[in-house]
Amino acid sequence: MNHRILTSMGGLVSALALLAPLPVAAQAPATTNVATAASALARTPDGKPDLLAPAPKTPDGKPDLSGVWHTETFKWVANLPGEGVDVPFLSSAAAVYKKRLETMGAHNPQLYCMPHSVPDAMFVKDFPFKIIQTPRETVVLFEEFHMYWQIYTDGRTLAKDYNPAWLGYLTGKWEGDTFVVEATGFKDGSWLDNKGHPRSEAAHITERFHRLNFGSMDVDVTINDPGDYSKPWNAPTVHFKLLPEDDVMEHLCEYNPDIEHLKIFGDDKTGR
């Protein structure tokens, strides 16, 4: 069994993991495109991909972020700001966060087959994501929940009034060698991490992608959410590694109704 069939609920207690929705993943694709791409890789003398080689460039000279990436730890999806960080909660958001801690994440959206959002969709250790970079749009394909981001790079700006979406709306631009992504237009209901840091419909999230070399990429995240926080705050830099000879697989989620029937978290169904 592939290790990526494991539940994606890193950071939650083991009892929750046993009740989590059942992820269903396809077998690794037996296609030639991965092998063809791998044959063009720079390699070390022992034949392995040279992950320390310079970052590739697009024809216009920008870093090419394309590839299959993953984190090597659950720590960012478990707790985005990190331990001991004084997050600038508004009083209402602090109460929500406190309740989620007390109930051990009872209403985490992923327990009900709802996806991670922005930015935490990238942070689930066992489920990689694939970046496809083009001149007018960058697409991110997530293995977990079989979802995607469309990051428009054709010069459009974020509108003032959106039909709220779970994953929001994203635009991107280059500042030197850094790809800056702006996300807004969110539907209320998603969490910033498994620990329960809230995110409201008013959130504006900025992600800064910087490819360090062929095999490494860093992302810096700024949360600006006047609905839940008194001022913008920055998450610690998130580190990603390239999977040079891998690809994303199909992954589906089957809701487990026993979560509600067993009522192990009590009768509260507010979800917030």
Image: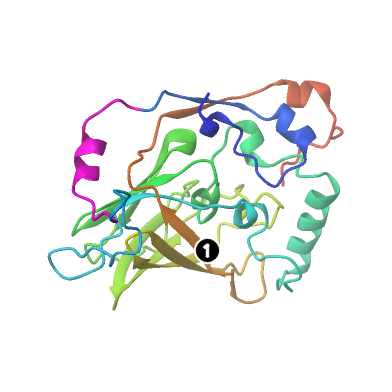
134 over 255 or under it: above or below: below
The residue type indicated by label 1 comes to Val
SS label for mark 1: strand
Left or right: 121 in relation to 132: right
Residue at 73% across, 61% down: 93
Rendered location of residue 211, percent (x, y): 36, 66
Rendered location of residue 124, percent (x, y): 55, 47
Rendered location of residue 21, percent (x, y): 63, 27
Residue at 73% across, 28% down: 18
Rendered location of residue 132, percent (x, y): 27, 50
Q: Which residue is mark 1?
A: 238
Q: Which is nearer the eye, 37 or 159?
A: 37
Residue at 19% across, 39% down: 36
257 over 38 or under it: above or below: above
Q: Residue furthest left?
A: 59
Residue 38 part of the magenta segment = yes
Q: Which residues are magenta?
A: 29-44
Q: Quadrant of residue 34?
A: top left
